[in-house]
Image: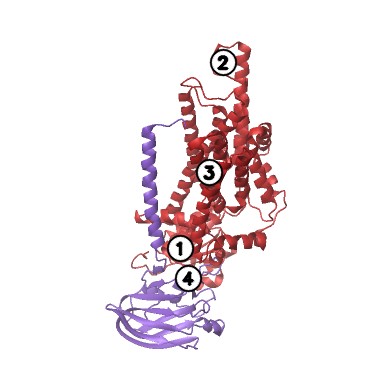
Amino acid sequence: MTRRRLTLALAATFLLGLVLRLLALQFEPPHHPDEFFQYLEPAWRHLTGAGVQTWEWRAGVRSWVLPGYHGAWMALLMRLGVHDGVKLATILRAHWALLSLTLVWAGWRGGALLTRRLSAGGAGPASAPDAPPAGWQGGLVAALLCAAFPLLVRFSIHTLSELPSILCLVWAVVLAGEIVEARGREERGKAAWMGVLLGLGICLRIQHAPVALVAVLWLLVARRFRPFAIVSAAALLPVALFGAVDWVTWGSPFSSFIAYVKFNLLEGGATSFGAFPWSWYWQQFIHRSPVGLFVLLGLGVLGLRASWPFLGAALGLAAILSTQAHKEERFAMLFWPLVLIAAAGYAGVWVAAHTSACVAKKPAPVRLRAWLARAVLTGTVALVLGDGALHCRGNDFADLTPLRYEAQAWAGRQPDVTGLLYDEPIFVGGGMWFGRPFPQLWFKPALLGNPLFSHVLVPRDSDLMRAAVQAGFTPVYPPTGRFVVLSRKAREPASELPVR
Amino acid sequence: MLLRGSHLQKLKFWTLGLVACAWLFGLVTFVAADGYFEATLPRRRASPAEIHNLSLWDLGPTVRASSYHGDWAANHHPLFLVDGRERPELVEKWASAERDHHPWVEITWRESHDLERVVLRHAGSLESAAYTARRYTLRCLTEAGAGPSLVVNSNEAAVASHDLACRRARGIRIEFDRDGADIIRLFEVETWGR
């Protein structure tokens, strides 16, 4: 492998990651109501005055940092003439899909790092000018897995706090490993970045803290006390930012953080949203990758000497999350990139041990062994990705169908709409998805008499649909399918379209 | 690591700089947003010549509000103030947001009218009398700016009728004084005139 060919291979990997994420943008259904109601809707409501405000936002258990980040993009796009809520949400999803490609780069660096560390002396700086960097085998495998692992691809477009936290913390762990190897100015710069990413990752998702602790522990075990001090100091910057934002928005520093911890951890409030046995995450991991998971964990364990921070962080996260009664798959999504990188590190050193750059000049049995090693590696990667693809469908909410979202958005685009009644207030996209400042309410037959409710969105052929038809509504969209939008019959035409 | 080069570095620097500047501009715009509610209903009929409720939904009023209680199940939308429902469900009322300490609503019409009186159907008309707003100010909005106003200090009526004569009025504004008390709940605002 030459440096040029490696560059092309990496570019192809990024391109693959990009294409898969664009496909996810097109076909991936909503993952969780929170991606609309917690991180987009507050910003939309702040900008337009209309929208749903969930109890979390009334009780002040959420930070304004992530909705503020989204809100800044929304405000900019609105200045540029994009006012449609669905378009704004799609652009923000595409933006996260693009940002999630940084995980591919983190995978490349993390995999290469682990392969270098595992190859113990055989992975020094490359001598030939065109030689690829040491550890490239593990880097390429990790990049490919991070680019194409189906669950990560699916998750990359969702506007949830987990995704930015995952990106920050995977990078922080990778940087920790590079700091262990680095010296001097490079070390200080990386430590500062690692600190900022660590702080940001924890502030965005406190449940991810075990991963941050393992990253810091890596520095301490390697006796890198100076970078540790820089990391600790730099981590305070995002913490201070979150504290200041809470002070401005909720009236006291760290107010949302305190309220969140109090509700979820001390008062056990999260259990009201469902409680699961401690083994639930493991069942979920096995369900998602029944064969691949064991391959990944096996490879990670074989390279434990170097991969322990990645594997330890992944297992530590799963263990800590398992102690919490309320469990959701997204909480543990950070498990996957850490395990993928850990496995890739050993896969890289294994394939490096069985191949070499000048293999063409070697005897046939050696060449055969090299080709077999490559075939085994390719098969393993294909197995992990294929297994993941076969089991990546579905999520925690079976009723979270995109059909209802499409119907809601369609109703919002009708010129005569002045209000919408729907059968389900949580599995829709809120005021932003509706895109109009008119009331939306949970269906009750008595509300059909309110003239503001011009449209009704209910399951086709349901009692709710029959009640709406009886009240003078008629089905208008779509002609077939699980859900139907009904419109009030024969109303006087509006003299003009409603504005704003 | 592999793609390092001075041109690429420069391009990266300028691209990131531009994106950051654009985002910061968006952030300033976002922070500066006033966040009040505004919606204009489509007009479905012309105003009659006789005395009528000028704010009724089908006359196409514009409703503005400082905030509203917008829960999933209890979406107390400001447009319920003008829906003309005689026997509404409890959800069909406007309620201000909990953190809104100076709630107000404003209803403006398509044309100028001569306003005679304002009728407020408070929460007490259907719910507990304790929910009825006690202190508020009614302001007539005219083309020239603020018109006559009426300060109500101790309202007890669940359906309060206030005489407020105002010529060439464009709408009304109601400013509530929570005075540390509960949120404001109001079922209907009727503005009678011709």
Location of mark 4 (residue): B68
Residue B132 higher or lower than A420, as above or below: below
Does the residue at mark 3 contact the one at mark 1 (Cβ under 8 Å)?
A: no
Residue B145 visible (yes or no): yes
Residue A268 x %, y %: 67, 61
Marker disc for residue A45: 1
- Chain A's colour? red
- Say which amino acid is labelled 4: Tyr
Say which quarter of the image contains residue A116. top right
Location of mark 2 (residue): A359
Marks 4 and 3, Cα distance to the nearest angstrom?
Answer: 42 Å
Local SS, label 1: helix
Please give the letter of the chain rendered in purple: B
Foreground pick, A389 / B9:
B9
Does the residue at mark 4 contact the one at mark 3 (Cβ under 8 Å)?
A: no
Residue furthest to the left: B144
Marks 2 and 4, Cα distance to the nearest angstrom?
Answer: 72 Å
Marks 3 and 1, Cα distance to the nearest angstrom?
Answer: 34 Å
- Say which amino acid is labelled 2: Val
Location of mark 3 (residue): A194
Give the mark nearer the N terminus: 2 vs 3. 3
Say which quarter of the image contains residue B17. top left
Does the residue at mark 1 contact the one at mark 2 (Cβ under 8 Å)?
A: no
Marks 4 and 1, Cα distance to the nearest angstrom?
Answer: 10 Å
Residue A359 higher or lower than A221, as above or below: above
Eye-nearest disc, 2 or 3:
3
Labels 4, 1: one chain = no
Q: How is the image coloured?
A: by chain
Chain assignment, label 1? A
Residue A145 higher or lower than B26, as above or below: above
Local SS, label 2: helix
